[in-house]
Image (cartoon, rainbow, N blue to C red):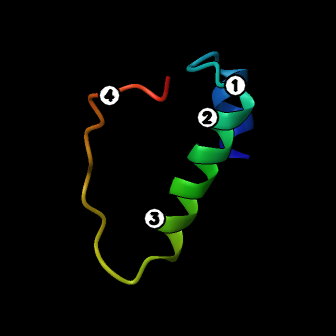
């Protein structure tokens, strides 16, 4: 639902690989037992 709402609001356009990564990250945040710490990725997937 989060990805659908982002797409509807035209916040971000993600390809299938990045959608999968976003879902994985969201699951880690929602299911984690510790507080979340932000990570800045300065590189690229490609």
Q: Which is nearer the eye, 46 or 15?
A: 46
Q: Position of residue 5 (x, y in %)?
A: 69, 34
Locate residue 4: give its quadrant.
top right
Q: Which is nearer the eye, 30 or 28?
A: 28
Which residue, given by chain and number where applicable, does mark 1 sit on? 15
Which residue, given by chain and number where applicable, does mark 3 sit on? 29
Q: Earlier in the sequence, mark 3 or mark 4?
A: 3
Q: CA distance from mark 4 to mark 2?
A: 14 Å
* In the image: residue 26, left or right of residue 5: left
Can you tell which of label 1 and label 4 is closer to the viewer?
Answer: 4
In the picture shown, does residue 14 fall above or below 30?
above
Residue 37, numbered label = none
Asked if marks 2 and 3 touch (Cβ < 8 Å), the reply is: no
* In the image: residue 11, left or right of residue 5: left
Which residue, given by chain and number where applicable, does mark 2 sit on? 18
| Element carrying mark 2 | helix
Q: Which is nearer the eye, 40 or 33?
A: 40
| Element carrying mark 3 | helix
Q: Earlier in the sequence, mark 2 or mark 3?
A: 2
Which residue, given by chain and number where applicable, does mark 4 sit on? 43
Q: Which is nearer the eye, 1 or 24?
A: 24
Dot 1 crowding, Cα within 10 Å, few <14, some 14–19, many 20+: few
Dot 3 crowding, Cα within 10 Å, few <14, some 14–19, many 20+: some
């Amino acid at each position: 639902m989060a990805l659908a709402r982002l797409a509807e609001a035209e916040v971000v356009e993600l390809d299938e690989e990045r959608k999968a990564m976003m879902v994985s990250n969201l699951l880690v945040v929602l299911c984690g037992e510790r507080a979340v710490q932000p990570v800045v990725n300065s590189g690229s997937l490609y």
